[in-house]
């Protein structure tokens, strides 16, 4: 009895499918856990789980890649002799009857046949247009990045990962399409894992590839939003319900906080490349600049948005004074001010890049604000609910879809146990989301 209990305690919450089938403890390393590597099996995670881009994972992967690169240095250049698998075929030594995708551990050379690759074709004809933020950067995503991807394995994997998710979310909702959709999702996850693995292997030699590392960072951000949508069971066409790990309570809020952490880390990783990027043909990806340092409320705020921000500031002044909450005051004040500038972008009649603005807000958050959200502090949750209005305004983006509405509903449910004033503060955000916000 006691031995059985000890064995149960060793089960991991986010382990891979193979380890779960064997009821063994998975170390949850990505893209492949130690057990699967040892048994030379395909390692597949059912949900996003612990994010593979955490600092610890990046350090482990980087250290491992240095050893691998050193051993293979006399044979080939690992950054040039790897290309993504064809998702319609699988090498004989990696057959899996349940999947129609491939995951060779060491893919061969990139070749021009990828121009006819269905995922690559879908990127150049459809996906690139759907992720372009403005007409200015559409050319970059359609021509420049694919050209660079054909010379850069990790970028090509990232591109194919997003293309796979895009196709998966476009599939009709019917039992007959379920297998094809599952194959696309599996392909997406494998391509994403390969992209990160190859990036880690290439880190020592990426100094001259700053544009590709930045492009991959952008793609991985989109993947973080889209993957939970693609793995969901849709409740209606075009509006899937976000799926969460079955081993913990469904909570879109915690999943969004994981995405926030991912975005901040990927931007920190790619920020050193930005000065160089501005001098290249990919500089148009960086055309947006927000003045988050201005403490004044922006004049472009609409009257309802201005009133919403003013209400948040009043709550801050009324509920924060002294003692234990004193350190929280500047965190809230900075976050609310940055939110005001973001809402001004949404309210401005001039066409703006609201996608980039929403990501910049995430990157501008004081570190302590994420901790306040995890501790479920009411004011922090109310501020996030206001940010959900922006996410909801972006719901036509296939990789954002229902995030705004579902996270808002989670916040509302959490605040039901708090004082009535906090739910009243959500009134503006609730109306904006229910009425559809600005088109």
Image: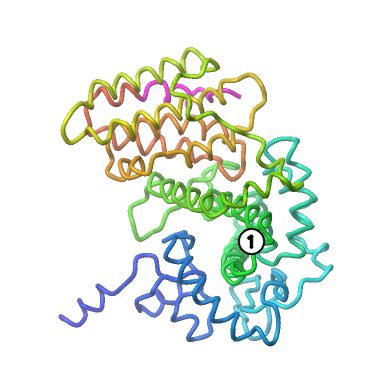
Question: Where in the figure is residue 126, as x and y percent of width and height?
Answer: 75, 47
Residue 113: image quadrant is bottom right
Residue highlighted by disc 1: 184
- Which of the two residues, 271 or 406, is positioned nearer the viewer here? 271
> In this picture, is 264 found above or below 422?
below
Is residue 334 part of the magenta span, yes or no?
no
Q: Is residue 438 magenta?
A: yes
Q: Tell me, what colour scheme is on the image?
A: rainbow
CA neighbours of label 1 inside 10 A, class few (<14), some (14 to 19), many (20+): many
Name the residue: 55% across, 77% down. Answer: 66
> Which residue is located at x 46 percent, y 75 percent?
33
Residue nearest the viewer, comparing 302 with 419: 302
Point 49% across, 41% down: residue:
403
Query: How far from the left and from the top, in percent, is residue 158?
Result: 64, 59
Please tell me which residue is depicted at 73% across the width and 47% down the height of the picture.
128
Instruction: Mark yes or no: residue 376 visible.
Output: yes
Task: Tell me if 275 is positioned left or right of 144 in this view.
Answer: left
User: Which quadrant of the structure image shows residue 192?
Assistant: bottom right
Q: Which residues are magenta?
A: 426-439
Q: How many marks?
A: 1
Tell whether 361 sits left or right of 220: left
Q: Secondary structure at mark 1?
A: helix
Screen quadrant of the C terminus: top right
Residue 213 image offset from top left, x and y in percent: 63, 57
Residue 196 versus residue 129 in the image, above or below: below
Q: Position of residue 258 (x, y in %)?
A: 42, 51
Quarter of the figure with the N terminus: bottom left
Q: Quadrant of residue 413?
A: top left
């Amino acid at each position: 009895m006691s031995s059985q209990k000890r064995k149960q305690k060793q089960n991991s919450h986010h382990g891979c499918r193979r380890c779960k089938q064997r009821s063994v403890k998975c170390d949850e390393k990505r893209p492949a856990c130690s057990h699967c590597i040892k048994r030379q099996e395909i390692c597949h995670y059912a949900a996003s789980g612990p994010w593979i881009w955490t600092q610890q994972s990046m350090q482990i992967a980087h250290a491992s890649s240095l050893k691998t690169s050193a051993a293979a240095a006399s044979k080939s250049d690992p950054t040039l002799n790897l290309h993504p698998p064809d998702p319609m075929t699988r090498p004989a030594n990696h057959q899996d009857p349940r999947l129609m995708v491939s995951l060779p551990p060491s893919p061969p050379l990139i070749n021009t046949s990828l121009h006819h690759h269905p995922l690559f074709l879908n990127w150049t004809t459809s996906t690139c247009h759907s992720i372009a933020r403005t007409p200015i950067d559409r050319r970059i995503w359609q021509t420049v990045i694919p050209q660079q991807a054909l010379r850069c394995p990790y970028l090509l994997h990232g591109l194919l990962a997003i293309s796979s998710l895009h196709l998966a979310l476009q599939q009709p909702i019917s039992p007959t399409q379920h297998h094809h959709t599952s194959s696309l999702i599996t392909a997406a996850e494998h391509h994403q894992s390969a992209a990160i693995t190859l990036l880690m292997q290439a880190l020592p030699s990426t100094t001259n590839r700053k544009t590709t590392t930045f492009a991959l960072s952008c793609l991985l951000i989109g993947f973080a939003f889209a993957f939970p949508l693609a793995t969901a069971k849709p409740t209606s066409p075009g509006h899937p319900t976000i799926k969460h790990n079955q081993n913990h309570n469904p909570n879109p809020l915690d999943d969004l906080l994981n995405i926030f952490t991912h975005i901040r880390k990927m931007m920190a990783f790619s920020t050193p490349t930005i000065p160089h990027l501005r001098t290249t043909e990919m500089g148009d990806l960086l055309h947006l600049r927000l003045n988050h340092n201005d403490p004044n409320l922006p004049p472009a705020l609409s009257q309802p948005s201005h009133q919403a921000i003013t209400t948040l500031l009043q709550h801050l002044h009324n509920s924060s004074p002294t003692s234990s909450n004193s350190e929280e005051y500047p965190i809230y004040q900075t976050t609310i001010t940055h939110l005001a500038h973001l809402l001004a972008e949404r309210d401005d009649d001039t066409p703006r890049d609201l996608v980039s603005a929403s990501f910049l807000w995430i990157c501008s958050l004081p570190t302590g604000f994420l901790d306040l959200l995890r501790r479920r502090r009411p004011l922090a949750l109310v501020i996030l609910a206001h940010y959900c209005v922006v996410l909801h305004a972006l719901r036509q983006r296939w990789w954002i879809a229902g995030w705004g509405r579902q996270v808002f509903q989670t916040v509302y449910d959490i605040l039901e146990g708090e004082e009535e004033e906090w739910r009243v503060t959500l009134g503006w955000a609730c109306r904006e989301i229910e009425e559809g916000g600005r088109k």
